[in-house]
Image: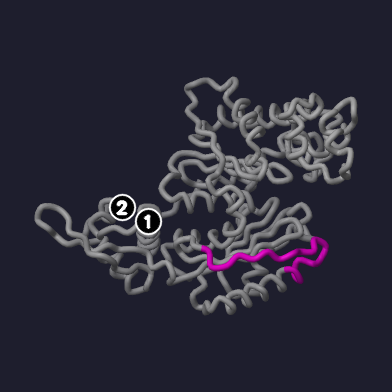
Amino acid sequence: MSYKGDNLMSVKRTNRSVALRALHEKGAMSRKRLAENMNLTPGAITKIVAEMISDGLLSEGEALTSGNAGRREILIDINAKKACGLGILINLQQAILSGAWLDGSVIFSQDVPLESDAPSEETAKQLSQRLFELLEENGIPREKVIGLGIAVRGITSADGRTVRNSFGALAETDYPLCRLFEELTGFHCVMENNVRSLLAAQMFLSRDENEGSQFFLRCGHGIGAALSIDGKIWHGVTAQCAEIGHIPIIRRGGKPCHCGKSGCLETIASPGAMQDEALSALSAEKTPLLWQTFQDRNPEDLRVFDVLTAASNGDAGASAIVDQAIQALGSAIKALIYLVDPGKIILYGSLFEDPYYLFRLSSELQEGVDMRHDVVIEKSRYNLQLEDKAACLLAVQDFMDNGGIQE
Ligand SMILES: [Zn+2]
């Protein structure tokens, strides 16, 4: 274990960071209330606030009269438009370029198609160029940019500098994407796995509700997850914490998974797996209702929602596929409930917009979990809205974590 002392610069950084987080989470407040919130003396707060006002990061607002003596207190708030964070989210065949102010309000968000076999350097050059165009189109000078957040599918290195494997989003593996974007843009860059960036965005936007531990489950085509413990996102030794989709479930004869193994949870329980399973079972005998639906439709158009509709209407074959998927996913989540004891499980993805699936999974998660576990299971209040801003919010949060001090 290594030990590090705090020098005055890191104390200053920490205090400024806590002030920014407190104002972000609780809204504008007086110096007195900020001092109480941060457990600092009024003298110390006055100095920190004065410095941050002079940097333009904080501003004075309304004056409130408080207490019996009728003292007037001036509210202090974050000057949200002082600085802007930029972001690039990289997914399969698609990138999202975004920008947001310090309060998380989005300035722009744009989808850009990606060619997965193009060299990453070319892709990064094109994305950087488009980002600069978007800055110009939105009238934002480069001096306002505090950094670039990169959210990327797959496995990133523990130091957040290298993409170990994006499973098809980028042409190369072990690619130093963070450094490349720093060279191309000149901005300070931070990189994170895409699902962890979604949880970070969820936590940033929901402000004062992130005490304790939360498990964030994202079902897109596959299954991804992220875990926060005591308000901090957990990475693990190799930055693969909460890779729940790749828990080995079937020991022999499992289907191949894109991670290179076979029989992973994702190959049974993901929306893509349910879809594939239904397509291969599609017949008048095994899946009669689904079969009927596809009498005048191309089976290639079969989607997981068709399977769920058939299952909810009593199709035995479709129900068996959904049951198997829900039981496998439910078992993995219950193991996590017993291991981590999270306060909340947040469900994210279009699958959870389906009332039948949501009800079935929630029921499965209640079964076999004793009442001492007080876990709240809910659909994200930002469901399907976080991809548009997750990457630029990484830059905003990194800036706040550094106390708004740029190197
Ligand atoms: Zn796998």
Near mark 2 (Cα within 10 A), the count class, few <14, some 14-19 or many ≥20, is some
Label 2 beta carbon within 8 A of ligand 1: no
Give the numbered dot on residue 38: 2
In terms of sequence position, does the residue under pointer 1 or pointer 2 come before the other?
1
Question: In the rendered structure, are the residues bearing label 1 and label 2 in contact, judged by CB atoms less than 8 Å apart?
Answer: yes
Residue 217 lies, with reference to residue 143, above or below; the image says above
Kind of residue sitting beneath label 1? Val
Q: Is residue 103 magenta?
A: no
Q: The magenta stretch spans which residues? A: 106-123
In this rendering, the answer to whether 182 lies above or below 397 is below
Question: Along the line of sight, which residue is nearer the eye, 7 or 26?
Answer: 26
Residue 250 is left or right of residue 358, and the answer is: right
Task: Give the labeled residue for mark 1.
Answer: 18
Nearest the viewer among 186 and 207 is 207
Q: Position of residue 193 (x, y in %)?
A: 64, 53
- Element marked by disc 2: helix
Image coordinates of residue 186 in percent, x first then y, are 59, 75
